[in-house]
């Protein structure tokens, strides 16, 4: 059933965010530390095991795949609710602080990507790969 | 009661559903523009995200609120649809089908990128603050932290007792960063080698802004999203840990 997939996703999400909050408390930080990342690891490891055991039926997968496909629309809504006015009101200093930080980080991507074995480029997108 | 009032009541009462329809139309128009006006050179999702930001600006100017288009009474559902809960839930869903070995292979690079990303943004932001005449350690640290993310800035600022003006500036710096990452990433992706899982994880660790990384990678290649998002979610916690402690002490030693 589709709900099993959704519930699996919800369970991974909640446990990840819970652990991220606990980690924040342990470290004495007023923030969640990696909760979403931990949730993603749970989902990857659990779904991998269930698929290998043949216990994740295609209809169950739909409950996860739907939310993955709705990701870009959610990001568009996220963009539409940003506080753009405040960002622009910060003036030149806030703009430079943010913009130069991005430029510095962009420049570091190829440098740090060189650590360890090189990554393999993804195959080009074919038609029908659009979410 | 006229038909328009009835319609607007329906839209307001069913805010989240209205948001689904509204975002659907925005995306449909954006893909049309991408196809017809740019010949597919600028990705439809990049145009949709940029359109979202422009609409957020319009919403902010019209209503004077802080949640962009979501402050317009008929479009409050945008706030739920684009809020942290659904954003993080769908990000986790994108991890479905990801290969764990890819993540393990990028491990060292991802950790280095997190430290370099937080430190690099902090130093750049702090230097800009100093150049603009802020000489006290608390303000420099807070603005530097804002250049990390718009959450690290206020967390650091409140811990150190920064003025509300400086905290507002740190939030603005973080918002600028997140928006530039959202819109600029597809244009530099090729040049910085952003076409594989490993560089996406490094990218997430360097940028750190979850919204920026989520939007920027969505506009570049949706398949990179889970890798970038995974490292990015550790960034704010790391920044909030280092900002009010290590960074503050370092800045204080330098300026006082």
Image: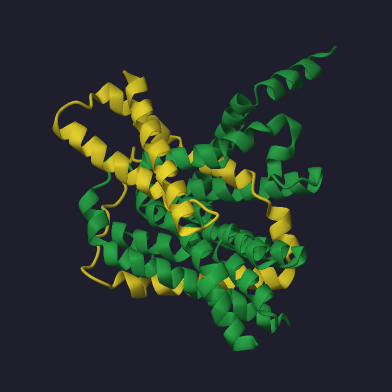
Chain colours: A yellow, B green
**Residue at the (66%, 68%) spot, across then down:** A95
A112 or B116: nearer the viewer: B116
Looking at the rendered image, the quarter that the C terminus of chain B falls into is bottom right
Q: Residue furthest top?
A: B1
Figure check: B192 above or below A18: below
Q: Residue furthest left?
A: A53
B44 or B165: nearer the viewer: B165
Residue B172 sits in which quadrant?
bottom right
**Residue at the (31%, 18%) spot, across then down:** A1
Q: Is residue B158 visible?
A: yes
Q: Is residue B59 left or right of residue B240?
A: right
Number of labelled discs? 0
- Where does residue B102 sit, x and y in percent of width and height? 24, 55
- Where does residue A4 sit, x and y in percent of width and height? 33, 23
Looking at the rendered image, the quarter that the N terminus of chain B falls into is top right
Q: Is residue B190 left or right of residue A118?
A: right
Q: Is residue A24 left or right of residue A45?
A: right
Q: Is residue A131 visible?
A: no
**Residue at the (45%, 69%) spot, across then down:** B117
- Where does residue B174 sit, x and y in percent of width and height? 61, 62
**Residue at the (57%, 29%) spot, across then down:** B20
Residue A91 sits in which quadrant?
bottom right
- Where does residue B72 sit, x and y in percent of width and height? 74, 36
Figure check: B113 above or below B102: below
């Amino acid at each position: 059933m589709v709900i099993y997939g959704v519930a699996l996703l919800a369970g991974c999400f909640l446990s990840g965010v819970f652990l991220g909050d606990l980690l924040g408390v342990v470290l004495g930080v007023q923030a969640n530390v990696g909760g979403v990342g931990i949730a993603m690891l749970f989902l990857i490891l659990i779904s991998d095991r269930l698929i290998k055991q043949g216990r994740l039926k295609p209809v169950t997968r739909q409950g996860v795949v739907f939310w993955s496909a709705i990701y870009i629309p959610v990001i568009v809504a996220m963009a539409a609710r940003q506080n753009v006015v405040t960002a622009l009101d910060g003036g030149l200093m806030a703009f430079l602080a943010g913009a130069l930080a991005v430029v510095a980080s962009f420049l570091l991507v190829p440098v740090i990507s060189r650590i360890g074995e090189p990554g393999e480029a993804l195959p080009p997108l074919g038609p029908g790969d659009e979410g | 009661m006229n038909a328009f009032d009835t319609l607007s009541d329906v839209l307001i009462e069913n805010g989240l559903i209205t948001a689904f329809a509204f975002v659907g139309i925005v995306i449909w128009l954006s893909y049309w523009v991408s196809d017809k006006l740019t010949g597919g050179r600028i990705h439809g999702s990049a145009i949709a995200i940029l359109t979202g930001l422009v609409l957020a600006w319009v919403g902010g100017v019209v209503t004077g609120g802080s949640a962009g288009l979501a402050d317009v009474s008929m479009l409050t559902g945008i706030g739920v649809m684009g809020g942290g809960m659904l954003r993080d839930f769908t990000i986790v869903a994108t991890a479905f089908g990801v290969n764990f070995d890819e993540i393990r292979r990028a491990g060292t690079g991802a950790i280095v990128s997190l430290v370099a990303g937080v430190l690099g943004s902090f130093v750049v932001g702090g230097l800009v603050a100093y150049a603009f005449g802020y000489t006290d350690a608390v303000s420099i640290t807070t603005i530097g932290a804002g250049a990390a993310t718009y959450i690290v800035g206020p967390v650091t600022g409140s811990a150190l007792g920064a003025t509300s003006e400086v905290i507002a500036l740190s939030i603005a710096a973080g918002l600028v960063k997140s928006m530039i990452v959202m819109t600029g990433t597809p244009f530099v992706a090729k040049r910085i080698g952003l076409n594989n899982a490993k560089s996406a994880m490094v990218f997430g660790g360097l940028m750190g802004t979850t919204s920026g990384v989520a939007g920027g990678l969505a506009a570049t290649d949706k398949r990179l999203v889970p890798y970038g998002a995974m490292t990015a979610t550790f960034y704010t916690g790391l920044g909030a840990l280092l900002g009010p402690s290590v960074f503050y002490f370092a800045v204080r030693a330098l300026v006082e």
